[in-house]
Amino acid sequence: MTVNLLDFDQPKLAGFFAELGEKPFRAKQLLRWMHHFGENDFAQMTDIAKTLREKLAQAAVIAPPQIKLEQISDDGTRKWLIDVGANNGVETVFIPEADRGTLCVSSQVGCALECTFCSTGRQGFNRNLTVAEIIGQLWIANKVLGRDPKGERILSNVVMMGMGEPLANFDNVVTALNIMLDDSAYGLSRRRVTVSTSGLVPAMDRLREECPVALAVSLHAPNDTLRDEIVPINKKYPLKELMAACRRYLEKAPRDFITFEYVMLDSVNDGVEHAQQLLQLVRDVPCKFNLIPFNPFPNSGYGTSHADNIRRFRDILMHAGYVVTTRKTRGDDIDAACGQLAGKVQDKTRRSVKRIMELSV
């Protein structure tokens, strides 16, 4: 049975070569060919002996997922629908900016956490993505985007903020993160790779120990009553536990702050009282805020906060000394903005928060 080598980080690849009777240094060679050069044809790997290339061709493949559809926004944002089999698809978004290029990567086919304002959550949950399907999104993006005139990669940052809850697919996500960080592969800085979570506390603690990268927490509410309603995982891990986990994470994090993401929902969580409650909630957690104007989708039941309300909310936080950004909506004309990723989920029956919790710890 052939294996897909995109599923392997360097230690697992070294183990694979050991089974073939080869030296561990082959793992670095192959990682460089696969990820640095984007090569998936063993015959083209010219510094590897021909006999080993032939052996690899018999035992393994390098098989990234395939693009089903590409859309390009008027603002330059790109969205790819990636085929993950059984008529399922996930979405990956590239966001170009003056000082960086950011790839928003999916980790699951759908999502089981059922956040009420998220289009992905409305699609149901099918399964976790494999390592090859996660890192394959980065592989594809680099292949499509190429390099700038100076020979540098256009893609400089990765955020695990696409479809799914990354920490509910912990092992596969961490293996993919290891490949992103590996100097023989993509060589990204831990500060340039961000995992976003809705608050799976045990998995946050595991990430701190196993692969600390920048952390963003999808907060969206300043009290348990409201968060229970719009982010149901809060019923399992309420805000007191979540804030404590954030403080623990900062002990080993590459950045000295947590980013709290907060979708602004008209007349739901955007009032003065909500901003004041938020200040009390995070008073012991070094953090910055990313306010996200709600991006509408059909039958969402929510409206976008008025610009004046967003500014008022921002000003309350800023006057308290916090760094606050209001996310500029990108790619909304191709449904590529935050909260709009829906992909194609064929089997929507496997939606279970309980099951996701079992997978995450």
Image: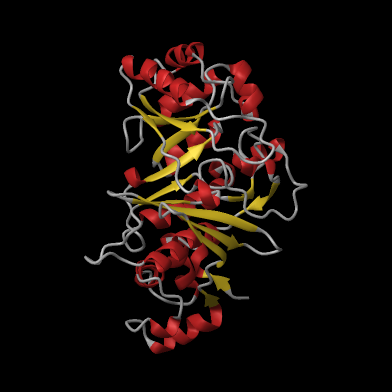
Location of the C terminus by quadrant is top right
In this image, 42 relative to 81: left or right?
left
Q: Which residue sits at x=51%, y=55%?
A: 92
Query: Does residue 58 lie above or below 78 as drawn?
Result: below
For residue 201, what is the image quadrant? top right
Q: Is residue 252 in sight in this rendering?
A: yes
Query: Where residue 60 sits: x, y (%)?
Result: 54, 76
In this image, 306 relative to 101: left or right?
right
Q: Which residue sits at x=52%, y=49%?
A: 333
For residue 85, what is the image quadrant? bottom right
Between 140 and 43, the one nearer to me in the picture: 140
Query: Where residue 326 sits: x, y (%)?
Result: 40, 31
Query: Where residue 227 sits: x, y (%)?
Result: 60, 22
Q: Which residue sits at x=56%, y=26%?
A: 265
Residue most extreme to the right: 349
Query: Does residue 126 lie above or below 32 as drawn?
Result: above
Q: Is residue 235 in sight in this rendering?
A: no
Query: Where residue 270 sits: x, y (%)?
Result: 51, 20
Location of the N terminus by quadrant is bottom right
Colour setting: secondary structure
How many numbered discs sit on the rendered protein? 0
In this image, 265 relative to 288: left or right?
right
Query: Does residue 318 lie above or below 65 as drawn?
Result: above
Query: Does residue 8 lie above or below 116 as drawn?
Result: below
Between 297 and 120, the one nearer to me in the picture: 297
Between 247 and 118, the one nearer to me in the picture: 118
